[in-house]
Image (spheres, grey):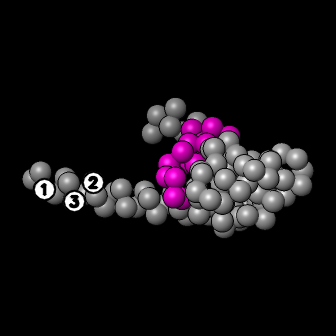
């Protein structure tokens, strides 16, 4: 293992890492996230961090920005776990597809 790999493995997960994970979600995932964690978005309205108009747009099919989702997962551990599990599912599916593609090449 190289020094760079060791440093990356031992460094704490930062904002850029979380944004990377969030970026792997598609529009439907983000809309589902809003519905799943609507209380957190409502809390942002109360704190004047989010307008009611934006919130209703999210509920009606507009996907929130990655930064907006990051704000939620920074304060809600359950939301962070939801993101982790969703990305794991996508990664497993991607690996399955890659394995099938590689098997076809042989």
The residue lying furthest to the right in this view is 47
Q: Quadrant of the N terminus?
A: top left
Which numbered tag is attached to residue 98? 2
Please provide the residue range marked out in magenta.
8-29
Q: Which residue is mark 1?
A: 104
Residue 92 in which image quadrant: bottom left
- On the picture, is 9 further left or further right than 77? left
Decide if residue 27 is on the left or right side of residue 69.
left
Would residue 73 be found to the left or right of residue 106 on screen?
right
Whichever of callouts 2 and 1 sits on the residue coming sooner in the sequence is 2
The tag on residue 42 is none
C-beta proximity under 8 Å, tags 3 and 1: yes
Q: Quick one: label 2, few (<14), some, or many (20+) residues within 10 Å?
A: few
Counting the numbered discs, the total is 3
How would you rate the neighbour count of disc 1 (Cα within 10 Å): few for under 14, some for 14-19, many for 20 or more? few
Tell whether label 3 touches label 2 (CB within 8 Å).
yes
Q: Main secondary structure of the magenta part?
A: helix
Q: Quadrant of residue 78?
A: bottom right
Which residue is disc 3 drawn over?
A: 100
**Percent of width and height locating residue 76:** 76, 59
Q: What residue is rendered at 89% in x and 55% in y?
A: 46
């Amino acid at each position: 293992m190289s020094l760079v790999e060791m440093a990356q493995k031992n460094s704490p997960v930062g904002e850029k890492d979380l944004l990377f994970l969030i970026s792997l979600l598609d529009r439907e995932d983000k809309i589902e996230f809003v519905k799943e964690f609507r209380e957190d978005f409502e809390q942002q309205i109360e704190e004047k961090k989010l307008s009611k108009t934006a919130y209703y747009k999210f509920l009606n099919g507009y996907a929130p920005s990655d930064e907006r989702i990051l704000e939620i997962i920074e304060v809600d551990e359950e939301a962070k776990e939801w993101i982790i599990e969703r990305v794991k599912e996508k990664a497993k599916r991607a690996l399955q597809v890659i394995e099938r593609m590689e098997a076809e090449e042989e």
